[in-house]
Each structure stands twice: as C-alpha cells, then as structure tokens.
Amino acid sequence: MNKVYFACSWFSDSQTNYMNQGIELIKQNKTVDWKYAFYPLDHQYKGFSIPDHPELLEDTEWQLGTFNGDMNGINSSDLIVAMYLPNEPDEGIAWELGYAYAIHKPMVLVVPNEKNKPVNLMPAMGATKVITIDELKDFDFNNVVYTPYTGQVY
C-alpha cells in the first residue's frame, strides 16, 4: 500500500466539499494506506487549527512550521494525490505539485467528472496521471504510469 501526500484546498465551501468527497473515496482505495497518509489538516503545526486561530496566518513561526511540516510530508510520501478544482485553482497545490515534480515524486491529479472544464497546462502536463474523482476509489496507485492529459487546458 502507498503512503500518499493528500494535497487539497479548504478555503471555500466547494473546495471543502471536494476535499471531503476525495477523503471518503481514497480511504476506500485498497492501494492507499490512509493511516499513514499525510493530510495537511491532520498535521497542523503545534496542533493549531486555522479556523479556530485565524491570527496564525500572520505568525511567522506558524508559517515556517506549517511549510516545513508539509515539505516533510511530501518528502516522506510515496506519491502525491492532488484534489484539483479547475475553476478554483489553489496556489499552494500548484507549488506542492511543482516541488513534487522537481524531486521526482509520482503525482496523480484528481479533477471533477465534468470533462468540459479546462485544466491549467502546468498541473495537467506535469502530473504523472490525471484521473476523475469517480476513479479515485478504485485507481491502482501501485501502477502510476505517466499518461499525458488529453483534455482542454488553459
């Protein structure tokens, strides 16, 4: 089973809903070890929660602790699974994907089922594989082979 870094956004209701949908599906995937996955919200610096402590967004210690914790999560993972909403791209996910690409980690970009929404060129072509959210539960993360994205990009 694979230890994944679960890259996701939670800054809007639609991002949070998409993240939660992805978590429920990936927990059922037999090729992912969710117990040892790195899900950033489960690894908050000093256990602080941003919704409970929004002032931390201005705290340099918290910022560095969060950044370094997330980098450790990426470095110690087998691969990256990124929950990507094309109409609400997140700069943090884009950065995490770029970093993962640079250190040669396989990346699976999870997009909504609607195929008519263009995806940003860099995540689309940089990802090892792009799948839809419906594929997340049964996707074989033991066999992540580069497959160029064939949908529309911007």
Image (spheres, grey):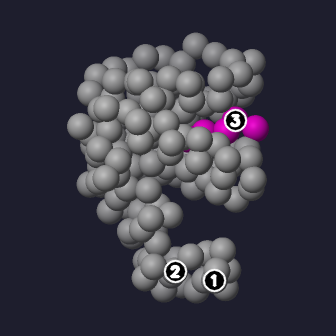
Q: Farthest residue in the left direction?
A: 1
Judged left or right of residue 72, residue 14 is right
Task: Identify the image quadrant of residue 144.
Answer: top left
* Residue 127 seen from this side: no
Q: Earlier in the sequence, mark 1 or mark 3?
A: 1
Judged left or right of residue 51, residue 139 is left
Given contact means CB atoms under 8 Å apart, are the residues at marks 1 and 2 in contact? Answer: yes
Point 64% across, 80% down: residue: 52
Q: Where does residue 35 sit, x and y in percent of width and height? A: 31, 53
Vertical placement of residue 58 versus 8, above or below: below
Point 48% across, 29% down: residue: 136
Q: CA distance from mark 1 to mark 2?
A: 7 Å
Mark 3 lies on a secondary structure that is loop
Inspect the magenta stretch and tell me whether residue 60 lies in it: no
Vertical placement of residue 65 versus 11, above or below: below
| Residue under pointer 3 | 86
Judged left or right of residue 103, residue 150 is right
Q: Earlier in the sequence, mark 1 or mark 2?
A: 2
Disc number at residue 53? 1
Overall secondary structure of the magenta stretch?
loop
Q: Earlier in the sequence, mark 2 or mark 3?
A: 2
Inspect the magenta stretch and tell me whether residue 85 lies in it: yes
**Three-letter code, disc 1:** His
**Three-letter code, disc 3:** Pro
Tag 3: Cα neighbours inside 10 Å, few (<14), some, or many (≥20)? some
For the image, the number of numbered tags is 3
Disc number at residue 48? 2
Q: Which residues are magenta?
A: 82-87
